Amino acid sequence: MFLGTRDWKGTVQMDRQHIIEQAEHFVQNVHSGDGSGHDWWHIHRVRNMALAIARKEQADLFVCELAALLHDVADEKLNPSKEAGLLRVRNWLEAHIEDPSVISEVMEIISTMSYNGGKNPPMATLNGQIVQDADRLDAMGAIGIARTFAYGGSRGRSMHEPGQDFSDLDYRSHEKTTIYHFYEKLLKLKDLMNTRHARKLAESRHEFMLRFLEQFYREWDAADEHQDEQTTTNSGDMSENRIF
């Protein structure tokens, strides 16, 4: 059922706020009880960040907010297949939105924004770039670290296996460690941001992850008792270049 009204010109005037509220309820039900870092609060943060970036970039707030809310409904980690997840999103959109251009753009964003080992091409639209940036920012910094360990624990991944090289394994393989994920994805995100505002935010979140890894390795090696004070730059160099 289409939720909206028609103005005096006969054109469709969607009740966007009502659609957003319906999307919130839908997404909350989909992600209830998630312990992998893809819960409702991840969606909530990505939506808020997408709106903040969209305002600075003068992008379409409605499309950015809707795509941000729905972006993980289709995630192949949470569905039998990526195709099944995308069909679930399309069915919801077609039941709530009449404008085919909105449906098409939201589907395009959701179907192409995944990191996928860094193999996907750049996003085609500004709205898509914004939602992708918002999602990637939530994989960085303190929140990104917390989510990474939450996901690893939910999949039974080892925290760290010194000296092991997992580069030949598939990106989705659960045989890899949580610490390895920093090197295969998280530390690469800073240089993959699309918008100027996201690039600025990514800098501080990237540095925080480097400091975390520096301290992690010190504690892992039981070397923190006699550690010397080092600059952030030196810490970053060590943690970014260390091979697992």
Image (cartoon, grey):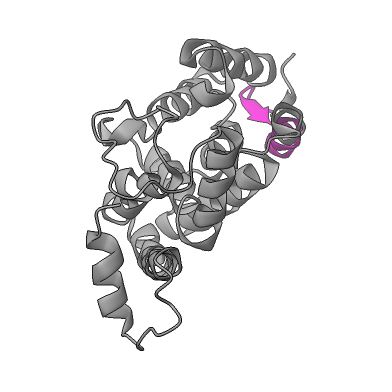
Residue at image position (75%, 34%) is 33
Observer-nearest of 221 and 35: 221
Relative vertical location of residue 186 with respect to residue 234 in this rendering, above or below: above
Q: Is residue 194 visible?
A: no
Compared across the picture, whether 180 is left or right of 9 comes to left
Residue at image position (37%, 43%) is 129
Highlighted range, magenta:
8-23
Relative vertical location of residue 29 with respect to residue 186 in this rendering, above or below: above
12 in magenta = yes
Point out residue 18 in the picture as x, y percentages from the top left corner.
76, 34
Q: Which quadrant of the figure has residue 219?
A: bottom left
Q: Can residue 88 be seen in this view?
A: yes
Observer-nearest of 79 and 102: 79
Residue at image position (30%, 64%) is 239
Point out residue 72 in the picture as x, y percentages from the top left corner.
56, 31
Point out residue 99 in the picture as x, y percentages from the top left corner.
56, 21
82 in magenta = no
**Count of numbered circles on the image:** 0
Observer-nearest of 24 and 186: 186
Residue at image position (52%, 21%) is 103
Relative vertical location of residue 116 with respect to residue 231 in this rendering, above or below: above
In the rendered image, the quadrant that contains the N terminus is top right
Compared across the picture, whether 214 is left or right of 69 comes to left
Compared across the picture, whether 65 is left or right of 56 comes to right
Point out residue 235 in the picture as x, y percentages from the top left corner.
31, 75
Compared across the picture, whether 183 is left or right of 208 comes to left
